[in-house]
Every structure is written in C-alpha cells, then in structure tokens.
Amino acid sequence: MKLLHLALWEPEIPPNTGNIARLCAAGDVTLHLIGRLGFHIGDRDLKRAGLDYWPDVEMFRHDTFAEFEAVIGVDRIICIETDAKRLYTQAHYQAGDCLLFGNESRGLPLTIRERYAHRSVHIPMPGSATRSLNLATSAGIVLYEALRQLHGW
C-alpha cells in the first residue's frame, strides 16, 4: 500500500494528467482518476507527458465519486480548492490520506466542496490577476508538502 493517494476529478487536459502521473511515480503515490475524463487513457499527449514512467504508476479509475469514496474512505479525503479557508501548509497529513483536485476549468463540484469544507486547503496566490494555478503545479506543491511531513524531510 502506498503512503499517499492523489485523485483527479474529471481531468480535462491530457498533459496535466500525464505530468501528475509522473509526479505520482516519483513520489510513490497512487493516482486515482474519477468520473468522466476529457481524454482517452491511451491519448498520445497523456502518454508523452508521463514519459516512460507509466509502468511505475499505480492508477485506479472510478466511474463515480461514490465509488471513489468507498475505496478511499470519507475521512481520508483532503480537497484542494481556491476558496478553502486553511492553507495547505496548515494541514497535518497522515499516511493513507488522499489529495483530491478538481478539473482544470471548474474545480470540484459545489456538492463535494461543501461536503468536505472542513477537510479542504488552498495554495496562496498573492497575484491579484490569477484565478488558479496549473493543475499539475498545484498537485506538485501540495503533494510534496504532504510527503515532507510524512518523511520528515
């Protein structure tokens, strides 16, 4: 069993998902893809972004959010959203936690954001013109803070 999980809700851009898969391989983290994808798993851009790391990626597909919750457990999901009240550095990550990111254009659905508001964090963005960071960049920032805490780096 991997130390952490990283989940993407209905990702839309193949290179982002490929970069995140590579990040999961480097961090020894399980990747979960939830709901309708904006691409096919065999997409050339997805494969290219993940380079030759795909054999090292433990990946699961979940057709529904309920299916994903049943596998991970509702008390292990930490949402990363721009409107969360707590900074990602203020969370205390534990083995078995799952970092959940929304898709590139809409983030997480309101029902999920409301349900997990108490387990949500955000990355500060002091630039006033920026709505959000790139999905792969955000995943790298939060994942490596969680790994830092868990490994004591």
Image: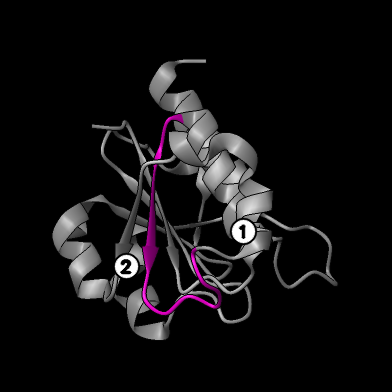
Judged left or right of residue 125, residue 147 is left
On the image, the x and y values in percent for residue 11 come to 53, 70
Label 2 sits on what residue type? Answer: Tyr
Residue 106 horizontal/vertical position (percent): 57, 81
The image quarter containing residue 65 is bottom left
Residue 24 x, y percent position in the rendering: 49, 39
Q: Which mark is residue 46?
A: 1
Q: Which residue is mark 2?
A: 116
Asked if residue 74 can be seen in this view, the reply is yes
- Counting other residues with Cα less than 10 Å from the Cα at mark 1, is it few (<14), some (14-19), or many (20 or more)? many
Q: Is residue 40 magenta?
A: yes
Name the secondary structure under disc 1: helix
Q: Quadrant of residue 104?
A: bottom right
Q: Which residues are magenta?
A: 28-41
Magenta stretch, main secondary structure, is loop
36 left or right of 103 in image: left
